[in-house]
Amino acid sequence: MRNKLNVYSPYVIMLLPLLVIYSVFYIVPLIYTAIYSFTDWSNYSSAIQFTGLSNYRKILEDNTLFVGVKNSLVYAISTVILQNLIALPVAVLLNSKLKFRNGFRAIFFSPAVLSTLVVGFLWSYMLSSSDYGMLNKLLASFGIGPVNFLGDPDTALTAIILTQVWQWFGWAMVIYLANLQSISEDLYEAASIDGAGRLQQFFSITVPQLAPAIKINLITGMISGLKVFDIVVSLTKGGPGYSTETILTLMFSKFSEGNYGYAASFGIVFLMLSLALAALLLRTFKIWEDRLN
Amino acid sequence: MPLSIINVSLLARADFLSGVLVEMNKKIILLGALITAFMIGGCSSGSGNAGTGNESSGGQASKGTKTISMIGWYEEGIMNDAITKINESLDGYKLEYTFVNLKQYNNVLSTQLAAGEGPDIVMDGASFPARIKAGNLIDISNEAYVADFNEAGLALSTSANGKVYGIPAYGWYSGVWYNKEIFAKYNLTPPQTFDELLAVSQTLTDNGVQPLGFGLSDSDTAWHSLIGYLENAYYNGGKATTAFDTQFAKGETTLSGHLNSYVDEWAQLIDKGFINEKMLGISGEQVIPEFISGEIAMFNGGPWQYTQLKESGMEFGMFSHVGNDKDNRWLVGGPAANFGINKNSENMEGAKAALKLFGSKEVQQSILKSNPGGFSYFKGLDSELPEEYSAIKEILEAGRVGVSWDRWGTNMPAQSLIDEGLKQLQGMVAGMTTTEQFLKAMDDKANLIRYKD
């Protein structure tokens, strides 16, 4: 027992600073958020009173929450699917002995280095329906448009999704590339000897061997998709109307209104939703991995 | 090498290594403990000083002086002269002003005040009544300088029981900027009624000029247009008086069922295509270059855009929001910002001295000078209006300036209702929302956010 302590204590001690940071900036605020979600704490009252489940009841009566949940799910699922559908074949292509492949890798990855807010402001000018909107100018040269990308409730969310697929598919591509480089060439050689074609090799060797990368990309993609905030703020601010509001933009607006207790209950609902989705994804992957093994 | 010697050698090396590890363990433990202690110390000292502003910081205040803190959304260039004048007269204190972007201002101030901290001098606009309601400010009703301001200027800083908690900086207003060259080209004069506005817009459209410019993706210009029409046609020229808003704020009446026909009247701007879906994809910032380049003939705005327009070299002017009575036109506006004293200020005497100086004629004059086109609520202090404001001079002199949300603010966080209004207006322009749905949504929102005693 003492020996075990001796072995582990350096690691425990080294983890302490991280644990303190994590506690101060995550665990403690989370506990406070949960407590405040049962209160009427707001800008406009000097005393905080316990109100039980009333904030959660108010959420159920608030139609905007359902819009936010729907938009967040549509955004998360669409971006994850599109990013990975593009990233996977691109990664396979850039893993082959292609000329300038490092240059292509850098180009595709570079948008992920930029701040999402900056990307949002740049795209707001490119997608603008004003006479200065670059994309509409381009479409006009082909006799198309103009398209009101961000001003039409039917296209605004799609426009936001596409900007984020553009920005982040390179990130997913890099993760796939890292995984691809660890797949043994022997597997492909053996498959070739057995007469498997390129496509069969891709689905029977590459995809199963990429399970760890797919898992990382899907889970991190879903979680970051659910917490989408900055790109919506910079492109549409949730509009037109409520057509692009997400859970976090709604939570932020409740917070801005000074209804801290109500905003806290939004935060807790969001956390529960994220945990449930993450658990569902992990379970699905576990089943898939078990089948592969 | 014999095996035994190798074993002995390895054992000796293992002993040596374990000794090194034990030493390393001690160092690692010490290092880890130091980092942890440093972080805990850092966190605690950081939170202790945040926002109190009771110490001279950054070497800016000289030895022996205490710092009076203040944050605001006016850029430092606008406030510098006033702050300098105050500091020249403050004894033993130094007023330090920090600029915070308007987009973050409400959250920054709200969270500081909610934590029992915040600046010594509290500056706020439409949310000032909310600060009074939350008990963030001290009562200054008995201060002599309060009497130097007229009643309209104290509207936002006076509580329901008549106590005064702040003084205004200056008066803001919005109207409609127009391109004089385009108007001259088509023999148009600034409209004085809503029908004239529709006619002017139609003439411009017929001649291939976009009449009105609105950046509906992020700005509140169309909201100003609607509120301006209501201020003229409903509150001051129609059936109601401004008391309607006070009743609405208290929950004694609803917007739906009273404003419908007026909103429908204004919505002709949407029906006729003068406000359209294309504008939903444009930000407020993107409209101004189009106005300057002559692609748009009119856009809703205020004195805060004056310098940018003036520097462009274009010929422009401002006319008032319009209703149905050209002799009773009103501008949308009110006290731009109010200054009060944080009840948790640790420099109460210094904060009181600074606020007294904010209420002096010299400082009020300085603030007014830094905001060309603005007007003052300080009795006897007149502003010099540039020529571009000639069409609204008489309206300003008559004091016909008001806005609904200042009246709503007496019993709800008005900004929340404004935000809802913007959302619903976007819905109307997109064709998703009817007038009745718009007003009903406003009533529902008001029900959610009214202050509860």
Image (cartoon, helix red, strand yellow):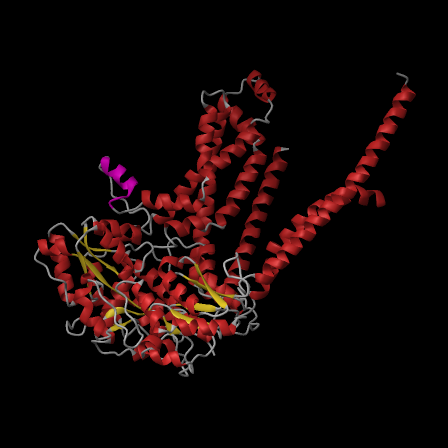
State the image coordinates of residue B31 (x, y, percent, origin top left): 72, 45
Observer-nearest of B109 and B413 = B109
Q: What's the residue at 43%, 83% (across, down)? A: B142
Observer-nearest of B291 and B117 = B117
Q: Quadrant of the N terminus of chain B?
A: top right
Whether residue B129 is visible, yes or no, is: no
Q: What's the residue at 27%, 75% (across, down)? A: B258
Q: Look at the magenta stretch and give its main secondary structure.
A: helix
- Against B273, is B263 above or below? below
State the image coordinates of residue A14 (x, y, percent, origin top left): 71, 45
Observer-nearest of A238 and B99 = B99
Q: What is the span of residues highlighted in magenta in the rendered image?
A: A131-141
- Against A286, is A256 above or below? below
Observer-nearest of B101 and A292 = B101
Rendering quarter of residue B144? bottom left
State the image coordinates of residue A65 (x, y, percent, origin top left): 45, 59
- As for residue A125 lying within the magenta part, the answer is no
Horizontal side, residue B15 vs residue B326: left or right: right
- As for residue A140 lying within the magenta part, the answer is yes
Whether residue B321 is visible, yes or no, is: yes
Horizontal side, residue A190 vs residue A98: left or right: right
Horizontal side, residue B395 vs residue A191: left or right: left
- Against B213, is A283 above or below? above
